Image (tube, grey):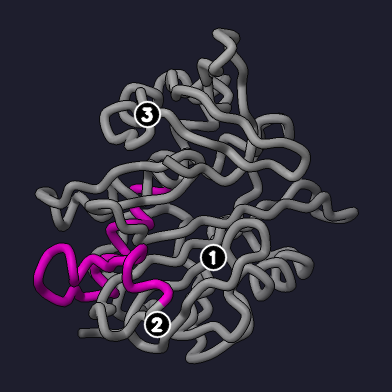
Amino acid sequence: MTAPTQKNILPWLKTSSFGRHMVYEKCISSSNRSVLELAGTGEAEGLLVVAESQTAGRGRQQRHWFSPPDKNLYFSLLLRPTVPPVRLPELALLMALGLRKGILSLLPDLPIGLKWPNDLWIDGHKISGILCESEQHPAFGLQVVVGIGLNVNCTKDDFPPELQKIASSLQIASGAPLDRAHLLAAILNCLEEYYQRWQQEKDLLRFLPEWEQADILQGKNITITQPSRTITGTVLGLAPDGRLRMQLNDHSQTLISCGDTAI
């Protein structure tokens, strides 16, 4: 399987900016951290950093992201969105939609579900994580980094014991290894398309039907753990700003902006 270098992704890349300037590293601490450092030098939107392995890869809430070398995709994109900063929380959900669409463009029969706020799941197992970070730079304004870790060619035995029951990969689900360069290009094509469409909208409303078709939480009774409280109720869907709509056990309704979900 070809490595996800710029030379190898170019035959399939259709973007105008995403991945057109790419940094490929065999091993770094964190692709998000690398993009943030490069963003401070004035790099243009669409800068892509790809790592074969990470020593300090992170998921949401500072969790470690399992990053074995030469198996998966670990990459981060630099965005300079023109939308109001209040809309930035929508990006994680949007990127999950684009990531799913990119995978399905090559593996259309995979039953990929979406778990709020931004995880991709197959048959009850997590296959990806997305971490969005932003900062206001004094010289370059608002800049956002979208980091994605996607389990591609891991076998079950590649995962440590504590992950084998909860994690999966595209190879496990499809039964065959994938060309990571082709897959990365397909994902970038879809991410840029979704990102450009999103900036022309005022919220996520036009994207919600697609989310709902793949939503694994819709109608489920779940518990959400937040730093200051635990919430239990039934998922009603998403609000246009990406918050989770829930029917609570006391018959009231609420909107949840963040937290860990357990079905």
Residue density around tag 2, few if under 14, some if 14–19, many if 20 or more, within 10 Å: few
Please identify the quadrant where the N terminus is shown: bottom left
Q: Which residue is mark 3?
A: 220
Along the polypeptide, which appears first: circle 1 or circle 3? Answer: 1
Q: Quadrant of residue 70?
A: bottom left
Callouts 1 and 3 close, C-beta under 8 Å = no
Give the amino acid at mark 1: Ser
Q: CA distance from mark 2 to mark 3?
A: 29 Å
Q: Is 198 on the left or on the right of 73, as rendered?
A: right
> Which disc number belongs to residue 160?
2
Along the polypeptide, which appears first: circle 2 or circle 1? Answer: 1
Query: Which SS type dominates the magenta stretch?
Result: helix
Q: Quadrant of residue 242?
A: top right
Q: Position of residue 172 (x, y in %)?
A: 18, 70
Please identify the quadrant where the C terminus is shown: top left
Q: Position of residue 96 (x, y in %)?
A: 42, 46
Q: Nearer the viewer, mark 2 or mark 1?
A: 2
Residue plotted at (40% across, 26% down):
207
Q: Secondary structure at mark 2?
A: loop
Residue plotted at (61% across, 17% down):
254
Give the amino acid at mark 3: Lys
Residue density around tag 1, few if under 14, some if 14–19, many if 20 or more, within 10 Å: many
Q: Which residues are magenta?
A: 162-191
Residue plotted at (63% across, 60% down):
44
Callouts 2 and 3 close, C-beta under 8 Å = no
Above or below, 25 relative to 4 = below
Q: Nearer the viewer, mark 1 or mark 3?
A: 3
